[in-house]
Amino acid sequence: MDEESRTLTERLRRESGAAPEFAELLTTEDRDRLVETLTAPGRPLWARELAAFRLGLAGDRRAFESLVLLLNHRDPQRCASAAYALARLGDPRTARAAAALATNELRVAYALHPVRLLTTLRAPESVPALITTLRRRLHPHDPYRRVALACIEGLGALGDPRARPVLEDALAHPALAEAAVRALAKLPGTYRP
């Protein structure tokens, strides 16, 4: 069990009150049982999250919709776990969903994990979505600095020259300038601050 799985397991064990169903969902190899947990009415959120996470790690695309909903949850821990599972799911819809969530201005407070997921996926949608999201963060007093920093770091990691103009614009923002310099240094071509 890796660190992300351990963290999720401990968090959901606490949320479940160590209910017998928790142990069953954690150990079952029956994917249909996990899918049933996702679709049955009245299931607690911890049970749905555990089932979706396990299905995602197993590459079972029936978890896709549940994981995308969790990626857009108000609880950052749920978002992080969903992003981790989505990165391993292998569903071609994942990048489009992450891009839609990252660029949705009405949900920008929850965009951090979709932004990070786009960087991990390295999909065709990644760079355009990160550029769009970062550009919107480049106005005075924007309260979503962590999202902007994640976009800058992602654009640097992806190394796509299309990011140069928006990263150069980020230099004018003191809270973002250092990260923008590092990201620009990773792009092809010569950059000297």
Image (cartoon, rainbow, N blue to C red):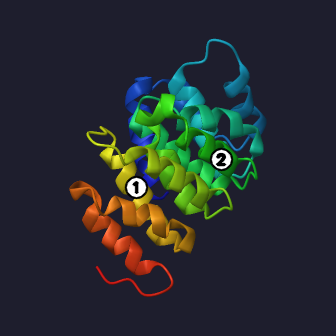
Q: Which residue is rendered at x = 27% and y = 63% of the image? A: 177
Percent x, y for residue 175?
23, 55
Percent x, y for residue 28?
66, 40
Q: Is residue 2 left or right of residue 56?
A: left
> Observer-nearest residue: 107 or 18?
107
In the rendered view, tell whether residue 148 sits above or below residue 49. Answer: below
Q: Residue furthest bottom?
A: 190
Q: Which residue is rendered at x = 44% and y = 51% of the image? A: 134
Q: Which residue is rendered at x = 53% and y = 23% of the image? A: 45
**Which amino acid type is shown beneath numbered disc 1?**
Ala
Work out how far the residue at label 1 is from the one at label 2, CA to CA, in angstroms.
24 Å
Residue 174: tell me if it is visible. yes
> Observer-nearest residue: 90 or 54?
90
Name the residue tied to disc 2.
56
Q: Residue furthest top?
A: 42
Percent x, y for residue 18?
43, 27
Crowding at mark 2 (Cα within 10 Å: few <14, some 14-19, many 20+): many
Residue 27: tell me if it is visible. no
**Which amino acid type is shown beneath numbered disc 2?**
Gly
Name the residue tied to disc 1.
150
